[in-house]
Image: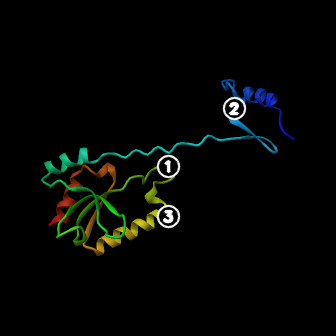
Amino acid sequence: MPLDPSTLSKTMRKLNPHLTNPVTSYTPAEEGLVMVKPKRKKITVKTDYSKLLFPFLEASGIDRPSEEVRFHVERLWRFDFAWVLGMGFDRGGVALEIEGGAFSQGGGGHNRGQHFIDDMLKYSTAASMGWLVIRRMPKDLLTMETVRLLKGAMQ
């Protein structure tokens, strides 16, 4: 039996007196009124780590890396930052990957099943091509430990 919109409005106002027009959140359906949940917008913030990273690396005696380096001919895989040490991207080098989202509510994309498996293939393929990948959390990026890891990998 369908609900009368005026009865519904009165009930909704009792539950939430700040609601100005409670019926606008509802849409007619065959069996009465059905609440329509508003879609949440997914907000993604991409931090420009290069603004902080480049001066830090240069002050530590490490050359400026290339950004968003595509290292595979057939796949669209990219490294966040890379130093090409051979004769080209397919010859290997040192890559720095920033792994965000580990502590995000629900986990970041890189912590979800298929994405995690895809990352495993990416890093394994990179290793087979001669790349040494340093993976860091954002909070650990601008540390002397990162400098030691990068300098060690570049020797």
Picture quarter containing residue 33? top right
102 or 115, which is in the foreground? Answer: 115
Q: Is residue 15 left or right of residue 65?
A: right
Which mark is drawn over residue 1? none
Q: Is residue 69 left or right of residue 115?
A: left
| Disc 2 target residue | 24
Q: Is residue 57 left or right of residue 18?
A: left
x, y percent for residue 2: 84, 39
Q: Which residue is depicted at the point 12% across and 53% down?
A: 61
Q: Residues within 10 Å of mark 1 (few under 14, many from 20)?
A: few
Q: Amino acid at mark 2?
A: Thr
Q: Residue furthest left?
A: 61
x, y percent for residue 134: 28, 62
Above or below, 86 relative to 20: below
Q: Secondary structure at mark 1?
A: loop
x, y percent for residue 119: 40, 65
Q: How far apart, in angstroms, are the residues tagged by discs 3 and 1?
A: 15 Å
Q: Of discs 2 and 1, which sits in the foreground?
A: 2
What is the quadrant of the N terminus in the image?
top right
Q: How far apart, in angstroms, are the residues tagged by discs 3 and 2?
A: 39 Å
Q: Which residue is depicted at the point 34% across and 72% down?
A: 124
Above or below, 12 relative to 91: above
x, y percent for residue 153: 20, 65
| Disc 3 target residue | 113
What is the quadrant of the C terminus in the image?
bottom left
Q: Amino acid at mark 1?
A: Gln
